[in-house]
Image (cartoon, rainbow, N blue to C red):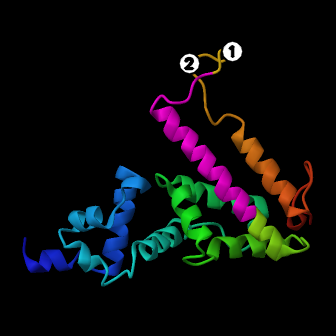
Amino acid sequence: MTPAHNSTRHDRDGVARAALALLDEVGLADLSMRRIAARLDVQPSALYWHFASKQALLAELADRITAGIPRGDASVLDTARGIRDALFAYRDGAELVLSTYALRLGSSSAQTAVHDALVADGADSPHERAAAIMHFVLGHATLVQQRMHADSYGAVMADDEVGAEHDVTAGLDRVFDLGVTALTGVVSGATAPRRDRA
């Protein structure tokens, strides 16, 4: 390997991209600095030039995972769905973002997006509601991902009435929508979000 070839992968962005790719392959439990370094053909110590710790790297990955969530005039529910879908886009994405959120690492862009949508919908106590919705979204997404992983390994038993062929996440989209809607304190039942009433 030439030095030039190695240097093209040995920067902050390259480390983060390699880590995200590896996350999809091996999952969060096996995502080690040693394994990331091996992917980049560098010594593990070289990674610490760009990230002070593994938690700092995970915080960067969490920010990248949630970077594409809806902004602007999206409703609270659409914003929450966008966060959930971003978490589902990566293996163990929900668990990774939950772990960094719990330690207050990385940016708070996802919660800020929820907060802004709540303000636009006229919700009271938007800061507290945004935190509650984030807790719900992260917990719900983690539950769904764990069920999907368990099912892929044959660890989830089928209901006798349903049979072997079934969706282990059936009904959870409805639960998600009900939970987010209840936490907004504004939208109820089939009522449309305020901005859609023109």
**Residue plotted at (92% across, 66% down):** 198
Residue marked by disc 2: 164
| 193 with respect to 145 (left or right) | right
Quick check: is 76 in the magenta stretch? no
Callout 2, which amino acid? Ala
Pick whichever, 30 or 163, lies toward us.
Answer: 30
User: Can the viewer see residue 75 in this picture?
Assistant: no
| 102 with respect to 186 (left or right) | left
Could you tell me residue 44's position as x and y percent? 24, 72
Residue marked by disc 1: 161
Within-10-Å neighbours for mark 2: few <14, some 14–19, many 20+: few
Could you tell me residue 20's position as x and y percent? 39, 62
Residues in magenta, as a range: 133-158
Q: Secondary structure at mark 2?
A: loop
**Residue plotted at (67% across, 34% down):** 170
Using the rendered view, name the quadrant where residue 11 is placed: bottom left
